[in-house]
Amino acid sequence: MNSSTTPSASRPKRKPVLSLVIALLIVLAGLTQLLATVHTYATNVSELNSLRAQESSLQQKKEDLENDISRWNDKAYVVSQARERLGFIFPGETSVMVLNVEKANGSSGSANGDSETKDEDSSATSSGESQTLPWYEELQYSFKQADKQKNISDEKFQNGSS
């Protein structure tokens, strides 16, 4: 009697272990499905937020372009852009183009007049470096330099042959 009660007493212990393993597998499968769903939701929310940001930037760009269109429909704006960008003038006006604004203003540096820039400019001119000249003066200067080189080489050739 003792031997028959022992196996039956051990069987009920196996059933809770087996049902625990099955319950854990079901919970694990549920968690996997839940995590997949949460991941999909998070991905969709992220994509939605990026699309909203893109939409707002495109709306802003559309408004800017519409403002540009309305500006170009204004005759005064078109005239100012033609004057500014293309250098157009009305008949009877005289066009003046300032090529070097710093020299025209009397300052030789940045707009705030840094003393370092002025010192660099004065040292550049005193060290013998050439300044930028207008094209016609540059051409005249190069002709003079070429004539000097020709005269020097002629003198060397004459001195060398005698």
Image (tube, rainbow, N blue to C red):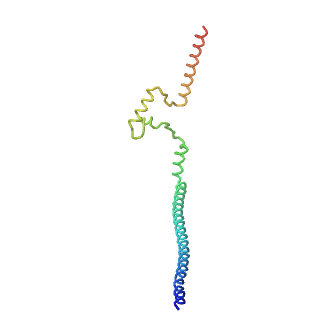
Asked whether 31 or 145 is in front, the reply is: 31
Q: Is residue 87 above or below residue 137?
A: below
Q: Which residue reaches farthest bottom?
A: 1
| Quarter of the figure that contains the C terminus | top right
Q: Which residue reaches farthest left?
A: 115
Q: Judge left or right: residue 117 versus residue 25.
A: left
Asked whether 10 or 128 is in front, the reply is: 10
Return the x and y of residue 118 as percentages of the image width and height.
40, 34
Q: Judge left or right: residue 122 versus residue 69.
A: left
Return the x and y of residue 144 as percentages of the image width and height.
55, 22
Return the x and y of residue 91 as percentages of the image width and height.
54, 42
Total marks placed: 0
**To which quarter of the image does residue 26 belong?**
bottom right
Residue at 56%, 16% in the rendered image: 152
Q: Which residue reaches farthest top?
A: 162
Q: Is residue 142 above or below residue 7?
A: above
Q: Is residue 38 above or below residue 67?
A: below
Q: Is residue 39 above or below residue 116?
A: below
Asked whether 156 or 107 is in front, the reply is: 156
Asked whether 130 or 84 is in front, the reply is: 130
Residue at 45%, 28% in the rendered image: 125
**To which quarter of the image does residue 139 belong?**
top right
